Image (cartoon, rainbow, N blue to C red):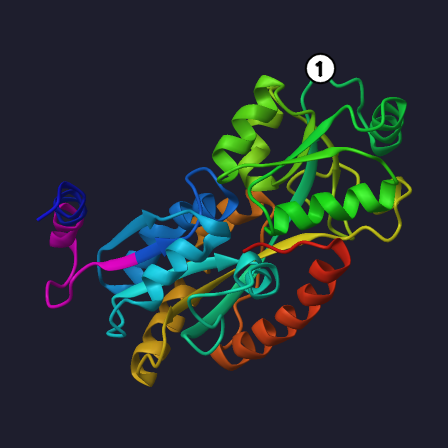
Amino acid sequence: MSRRNFLFWVCALVALPAFAQDRPPMRIILPVSAGSGVDTITRASSNALAKALGQAVVVENLPGAGGITGTQALVKSRNDGNTIGLVSNNHVINPSVYSKMPFDSVDDITPITVIGTTPLIIVVNPKVPASNVKELVAFLKAKPGAYNYASSGNGTIIHLAGEMFVEEAGVEVRHVPYKGVGPQVVDLISGQVEFGVVALPAAQGHLKNGALRAIGIGSRKRTPAAPEIPTIAEQGLSNYEAEGWFAVIAPAKLPAPEVKRIHSAVVTAFSDPDVKANMDKQGNVINPGSPDEAVKFFRAEIAKYAKLVKKAGIKLD
């Protein structure tokens, strides 16, 4: 047994005694790095989910290739109801970004539910002399091509949201892709890059301690979690709108009873008062839909992002 697998099962077994022992722990695969918005959401709800499932849970981050690495691991897992994943917009963007995909983003999974949405915000390093969109645009236009914006990876929703801002603002900047939100935020804080887009849950702590400064939120409306942050649209870029979402998926052909069991547990977990308070604090809007609605949503999002990716001219091997 590898050291990684040994640690996986040690962590699982430590949590197991509180639950029925007729099932192994639920493995939750996150195709994102630690510290990302999806990671923050998952860890805030994992205890409530374990309680709702009556089953221990183990969260495993498997970032890489815009989420393909982790999702491929999920696709290859047994469809016995003991492995699920939390994915975001990247899951439906990848088919348009990559020339070859190791799986089909709809046919090779079982969509369980689209849980809700999360705000995306544009942030700057505090050394950048800008506190709003007008000032940031003026700063960037003063030296065309001299500054950088960071994303969590090529072809991600963070990348697309950044490209949308660059296009709307009419500025010339260099894109610097990172391997996940964690490294992206580290370089934003250190000043290696001037600005970037991040999910609000991943940035809140850095905004509070002054390590980053918020310029605007990508949603059409301000969020109650940070009402002081104006939208990008209300600051003059009226066509700008970028928002993240997160969903639960499982391996393909998951038996109907397991789909129902997991869906019910997710709904229950995100209805927990403590989880709801945490989600409100992060600015997430929770509204879990049905499995059938999730399938339709994924297909519609694939078509929507195909147009955006083509317009942005993003294509990876």
Which sits in the foreground, 222 or 250? 250
Residue 132, percent from left and from top: 82, 30
In the rendered image, the residue lying farthest to the bottom is 256
- For this view, does 7 lie left or right of residue 246? left
Q: Is residue 210 above or below residue 15?
A: above
- For this view, does 144 lie left or right of residue 90? right
- For this view, does 179 lie left or right of residue 127? left
Over which residues does the magenta segment extend?
Answer: 12-27
Question: Residue at label 1?
Answer: 127
Q: Is residue 14 magenta?
A: yes
In the rendered image, the residue lying farthest to the left is 1
In the rendered image, the residue lying farthest to the top is 127
Q: Is residue 16 above or below residue 122?
A: below
Q: Is residue 203 magenta?
A: no
Quadrant of residue 312 in the image?
Answer: bottom right
- Quarter holding the C terminus? bottom right
Which sits in the foreground, 68 or 269? 68
Q: Secondary structure at mark 1?
A: loop
Name which residue lies at 36% across and 48% down: 62
Disc 1 marks a residue whose amino acid type is Lys
Q: Is residue 67 above or below residue 251?
A: above
Name which residue lies at 62% across and 70% down: 302
Residue 154, percent from left and from top: 59, 47
